[in-house]
Amino acid sequence: MPGPFILSFLLSWMLCLVSIVPSATAGAVSTNDNTRPAGRIEGDVLTLRLFADVGSWRPEGPQGASLDVAAFGEEGAPLSVPGPIIRAHEGTTVALTLRNALRSELRVFGLCAKPGPCDPVSVAAGASREVRFPLNAPGTYYYWASTSAQGLVTRPRADSQLGGAIVVDPRKGAADDRVLVISMFDDGRPGACLPAGEHAVFAINGASWPHTARLHYRVGDIVRWRVINLSCVAHAMHLHGFFFRVEAAGDIGTELRLAPGQQRTVVTEHILPGRTFVMSWTPERPGNWLFHCHMMVHMSAPAGGAHAGHGADDSAAGMAGLVLGIQVTGAGASPPSDGRAPRRLSLVMREEPNRYGNQSGFRMDLEGVAAPRLNSGPVPGPVIVLTRGEPVEITLSSIE
């Protein structure tokens, strides 16, 4: 006879199967770029009506696989991933009506005053509930839900898109920013989404590269992003070509604003599940750049060319998942010169037969610099240490 843990798991999974049966009115799930706040503001009250249901989500574009997921939507509009963004100025009271069209009880977290934790809001299957709470602390927050008793990182895969952003702007003015919500769906596992399997689909604002947003800026712009990780795994978010400043970090109930002297200047920021951070940067050179997770499985197309048989896209360039394209236009300023000659490096790529069993492989050698070697090449490769502001010239060549 199965033990208590197995019985509990099976019961949770059976309840999840019941909850993801689409209702008669469920349809396509749209992607949400988080640029339009949900609801209607009158005076200092934000009134909005949300519902939860199951719909068909296509994070990999119109030709990609259709995934049945539970999601939130605004009444009168389609379901969306992520859910509708709740955004208003500090001092606003949210008057929310939440309708649960799922076939299981829904537990929603984050619908309360900040800072601090709060109890989840429970809505029975087929029922509606009204919730009121003040937006009394500027910052980046979120809400999420589940049809089980599991947490954010262990909730069933069909619940993995039940969540959205909450942004509280200062009383005076609002930042010109973008809100980026990271999510994940593991369609290769029968239950909770941790750890990520080889068939996992990763998305930013409901889409996987190359269907994610293309962001456009001009040289000299001040760019500000709010990043929210609603997936069940950590990510190392990396910006190509430029440094960025981490201005704040937080979670579902708190945000810590960093003083100028405490802000980190980085090119990569590690973000755990359920965490948030605010970043700002200034593009200094025109060109096409990327913002992506530096964990290869989170931004790479599988060896077969598609996610678990989902439609591949020739424009993806071998990438998928957590990747954003950035186009910077305008005239780039020439870097200041102090007359120093650039430090010249020569980086050589060599192909080796039978590098991985009977498969060929490649290695990178930095000419004149010794690197630890495994078998016949340096792994993972030579370390190049550079100093910001120091002119460098790198010549890359290939030897077959």
Image (cartoon, rainbow, N blue to C red):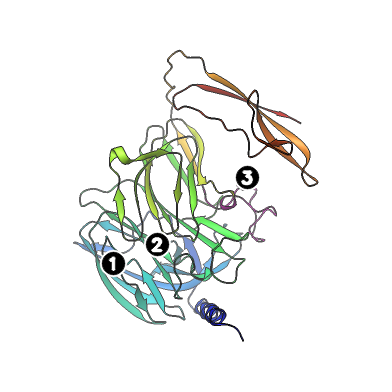
Q: Is residue 287 left or right of residue 88?
A: right
Please tell me in which quadrant of the rendered image residue 365 appears.
Answer: top right
**Which sits in the foreground, 181 or 380?**
380
Q: Secondary structure at mark 2?
A: strand
- Region of the chain picked out in magenta, as a range: 297-324
Q: Nearer the viewer, mark 1 or mark 2?
A: 1
Q: Quadrant of the C terminus?
A: top right
Q: Nearer the viewer, mark 3 or mark 1?
A: 1
Question: Which is nearer the N-term, disc 1 or disc 2?
Answer: 1
User: Residue furthest toward the top?
Assistant: 339
Q: Is residue 382 visible?
A: yes
Q: Secondary structure at mark 3?
A: loop
Badge 2 crowding class, 10 Å Cα cut-off, few under 14, some 14 to 19, many 20 or more, is many
**Which sits in the foreground, 138 or 33?**
138
Q: Secondary structure at mark 1?
A: loop
What residue is pinned by disc 2?
164
Q: Residue 343: image x %, image y %?
A: 54, 19
